[in-house]
Image: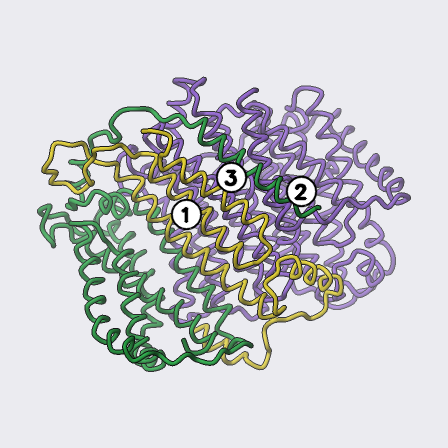
Chain colours: A yellow, B purple, C green
Amino acid sequence: MGWLSGMTIAMILFAIGTTALIVRKDLVVKLLALGLVNSSGILFLISIRFRPQMEAPILPVKTGLPIADPLPQALVLSAIVINFAILALSLVFVMLLVERYHSTDCGRIEHAVETEKATLGSQNLADDTLESEVQAADR
Amino acid sequence: MILPLLPLSHVFLGLMAIAWKASARATLIAALFVDIGLVTVAFSPAAHWLSSAVAGGWTDAIGIRLALDSLALDLLLLTVLLELAVVIYLWRQRLRPTFVILLQFLVGGVMALVLTQDLFNIYVILELLTLVSFLLVAYDRRTFQIWASLKYLILASVGMSVFLLGVAIVYANVGRLGFAAIERTVVGDPQAGWIPLAAALLVAGVSVKAGILTFSLWLPDAHSAAPAAISAFLSGLVIKMGVVVLIRLAGVFPLGSVLQILGAITGIGGAIYAMSSKDLKRMLAFHTLSQIGYLLIGMGAANEAAAKGVLAYALAHGSFKALLFLAAGVAYDVVGSTEITELIRARHRIPLRTRAALLLGTLAIIGLPPFDGYIAKAPLLAAAHGWGNQIILLLLGIGTAASFAKLLPLFKGPYRRVGNDPAWKSYVVLALPIALFLPIERALFGAAFILPVMDWIIAVESVAVVTTGLLVHRIYRRFTVRPSERLFRLEPGMFAILLGFVAIYLLLKLG
Amino acid sequence: MKRIVRTVLAVTLSLVVCGIVIFDLTIPEGPPRPDDSELLAAKTGAPNLVSAIYLGARLYDTLFEILVFTVAVIGVRFYLLQRPSTARPDPIPESHVLQVSAQILYPLILILGLYLTCFGHLSPGGGFSGGVVAASGLLLCVMSIGVDTVYCRLSGAGIEQLEWALPMMIVAVCVLPLAFGRPILSNLLPAGQAGHVFGSLSILLLNVLIGLKVLIGSWMVLHTFIRHRGEI
């Protein structure tokens, strides 16, 4: 298939993603890199069963070509939903941290968390006066 | 074929708690009853209802197979035990529906994972467990909890992505995702080129969740930051899920000595960090890392007795680690801090039952003879062949004893009856397997299990290990050697995952 | 200095991992799938084999994935719904062109989502993609009408209860075949003539439930983010 298969591209994206996850200090960029790593895994899974000249896996197949493998496509559906969930939840936590420290710098947040943990005071992010709203939200 | 009912009942009851604002306690009790009922069926002769079958009546070629083997039985028992203990622990607290549904999803996910025999199903359930425990760790919404959770999520996602790459390669070469088919293909051609890479990716991916030191650098922060009941669940049960997946992988791929090396590193590293830790919950979390080392070395020694020892130790470790975490939670509520020096200084304020629970947990974890730590470690010590294994297991025992010797001052001094510990019933629930481990193990594994336990040599060895540990602690106190805590940040975590994968790959390729 | 060392180390390590996987990858040649496609289509009544797999043979997986989605919704609501953000930027007024075109487009997009969901077993589509398309349509509706109006109308219709009732219905659809003597997680309703819209009622039912679930879940996530941050 030549060297430029989907799997090669997926691994290059994986490498870019992990590099960015380590090197860049901004938390939002780290999340984008995480999304890139996850998506590269999905691309790898899809392209590992790719052959040229195949037909879509929908059954009345008019041409005589073989059918593409439907199983990785079904697996990828689950993986995409999982990636969406991870992205949404990590974004929520990054938002909470950034609002607390007014900075998206990972090193600064880490340092602040470690110094605060030493005191172990009541570092609550939740506000007790809004308990009723929390109850309403919990339904 | 009603095996999926085990996890699905938890899911359904959890959703009921949040959909109809049904009393949270009612759903917890209902889930407990369903569990106890189904697990009793699993242990009884009527277990043919729960035999292995493909979900939905499909074929093995496309469907997902669920099976109830001895590993699943062992962990189902542990799940029910921990569920009972945690429900009693949380009984008096005000439970929000969100907490109940997340807890039910956690238990349901654990049950689903031990039953499944399909590789991609493992991926999906591990991601579900990651997300649910990530939400539960940060439940009190304190800053350090949120940061610990976020680190956990990022590292676990990268690990699962690596796992997915492995699943893709396995699927391309085998054509099916069930373990039976993979095993058949691997046995048919053990020297095939794809096996080292796929096995390395899968092992590296799941090691992030399994609590192996170099991969799971998120573990000390996450498990010590979580609320007490959640820590008990995570350390006692959810970590075992990664180990379950490793056991299944070891049964399919020829992993050789990779597991033993990983076990040695995590055991000794965890013990060293535990010895120098000053915070009780963090020390317990480091201990979890160290005890996973026991399990991995037991798995690496591939014989029947060691396999049974691993199962027994998983059950035992779950019970005493949960006991320790729950008691530590109550102590934290009373004293206001989890630093060991603070706890020792304020020990007259801690209720007597809490201290008794901590004492029982400590005796169990260091492996003193009548308790279940010893009963579960004895087969591992007996079955681990080779001098390397024996030395490492002994070192682990010494390290465990040395680090828990720090807690000994907690148990002496004034014994006034102060305060009431509301959670003492859950201590009783967890203390039952600690004290009565032999009959439980006979029920699970038959009489053949008992033999290594009655070996005098191993008993003497265990007591010797404990005393050596106490001596080591005395010596260690002179030098304040503190290994670097900077290892547990985000970037070293990422480095460790990538480096660990390369190391495992080279081991598999050249070994 | 240390920064450069770390960067170089990260780049080399990532490239090493990438290289290992690229160069050691061995895939067997040959046609991809053994031929049980006919069996699959006949048993579920769905000509779209991908639907037949993830809603038929591997329904157990899909169930857990729906739970992952539910957990995401629970998490976003629990952590963000307490109090509004401390940083509230001034709302950017919508351009008139955007409002008018959104008002024209959103019913079409909602119908497209409905079509994708209902015909997911005959052509590519299904509950997930249909639900996401419908959620985009709902977002356009928010842009044209305003988030509070949409929220009041939807909450008045009981969308929050539906959000939690839908996974329960999906679990029930999975478990109910037990009452008919068939194993759990198999088809609840019998498969009819393949190729017809109502040819596979079970997969159609599941697609509709999943589409609704994705739509409502996405709406709740989006609404929580919007309300936390302020107006769009």
User: Nearer the observer, disc 2 or disc 1?
Assistant: 2
> The residue under label 3 is which amino acid type?
Gly
Q: Chain of mark 2?
A: C
Question: Considering the numbered disc 1 on the image, is that residue within a helix, a strand or a loop?
Answer: helix
Check disc 3: other Cα within 10 Å, few if <14, some if 14-19, many if 20+: many
Separation of disc 3 and disc 2 at Cα?
Answer: 26 Å
Question: Considering the numbered disc 3 on the image, is that residue within a helix, a strand or a loop?
Answer: helix
User: What residue is at 40 percent from the left and 49 percent from the top?
Assistant: B6
Point out which mark residue B357 bears: none
Nearest the viewer among C114 and C137 is C137
Q: Is residue B381 left or right of residue B460?
A: left
For residue B497, above or below residue A103: above
Point out which mark residue A39 bears: 1
User: What residue is at 45 percent from the left and 43 percent from the top?
Assistant: A13
Task: Check disc 2 and report the residue beneath it.
Answer: C5
* Callout 2 touching callout 1 (CB < 8 Å): no
